Amino acid sequence: MAARLIDGKALAQSIRDQIAKDVAELHARSGIRPGLAAILVGEDPASNLYVKHKEKACHEAGIYVDDHRLSSATTQAELLALIEKVNADPKVHGILVQLPLPKQIDSKVVLEAVLPHKDADGFHPYNVGRLVEGMALFTPCTPKGIIKMIESTGEAIEGKRAVVLGRSNIVGKPTALLLMHRNATVTVCHSKTKDLAARCREAEILVVAIGKPKFVTGDMVREGAVVVDVGVNRLEDGKLVGDVEFGPVSERAGWISPVPGGVGPMTIAMLLENTFESAKRSAGIA
């Protein structure tokens, strides 16, 4: 039986619709409108497109956008000065620094310069530490979206065997933590994992985030598993595909997310949610 689809696009839209209502209510109640500072350095086409999508979603939800487009020649000192400015701006409740940054800028230094209580992406070491302890101020957007997608299936996470394929700081590691906080038994796999296919076949929940097109094949997936494909890869013919071979895997999985239309829209929705939650905190509203 073919897997049921985890429609991230539809789920994200329902979340965005609710955020728009909540934003209007917050503004009416407190006079505060959530604000996001979006900072893009350079002319990378993919990054430019991502930021445009995020800004469009903010506008539709009634979130104020403080837009900053900087040239690829921007120095680290100039970028840090801008971050200091938006850190101090009371209209800004979340700060997004689009990655990757040009080679002359140290991403680690830049991300640590963002005030933790405005770190809408959840990348600051302070917020990472809180995430480890299960007390996240901001949960990273993509992992947060992944968990909501799994929960939307109605399948329990507690007690399940979960495998996260990929150990990046942005997706793999925080996703593993969130699954552990929900009492899954988690294995994190990577390029040095022995007998990777066998580890994947153990998974009742399989999250794939390695950036290799169609890497996970049907014979690597357990019957009935929940499969979330985080990868976005563009083939030579221009087609977008995930890290999972969708057709064969969907014949074995119980649930599967598509690419496109899966994790991507959820990441944007979670950025809006994080910004809104930050604005609520600034208003003293739990």
Image (cartoon, rainbow, N blue to C red):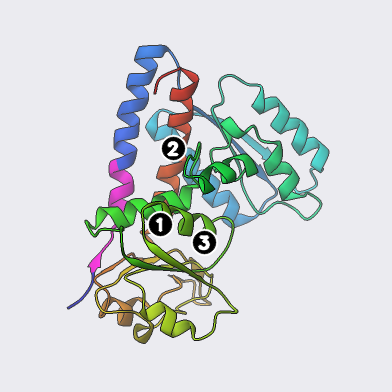
Q: Is residue 201 visible?
A: yes
Local packing at callout 2 (Cα closer than 10 Å; few below 14, some 14-19, many 20+) is: many
Q: Is residue 12 magenta?
A: yes
Q: Which residue sits at x=66%, y=22%?
A: 88
Question: Residue at label 1?
Answer: 179
Q: Is residue 229 left or right of residue 255?
A: right
147 shown above or below 205: above
Q: CA distance from mark 2 to mark 3?
A: 21 Å
The amino acid sitting under disc 2 is: Leu
Q: Which residue sits at x=70%, y=32%?
A: 83
Task: Report the number of discs.
Answer: 3
The amino acid sitting under disc 3 is: Gly
Q: Which residues fall within the magenta stretch?
A: 4-14
On the image, the x and y values in percent for residue 161 come to 35, 68
Q: CA distance from mark 1 to mark 2?
A: 22 Å
Nearest to viewer (mark 1 / mark 3):
1
On the image, the x and y values in percent for residue 229 come to 41, 66
Q: CA distance from mark 1 to mark 3?
A: 11 Å
Q: Is residue 270 magenta?
A: no
Question: Residue at label 3?
Answer: 172
Q: Is residue 70 visible?
A: no
Q: Residue furthest left?
A: 1
Question: Residue at label 2?
Answer: 272
| Image quadrant where one finds the N terminus | bottom left
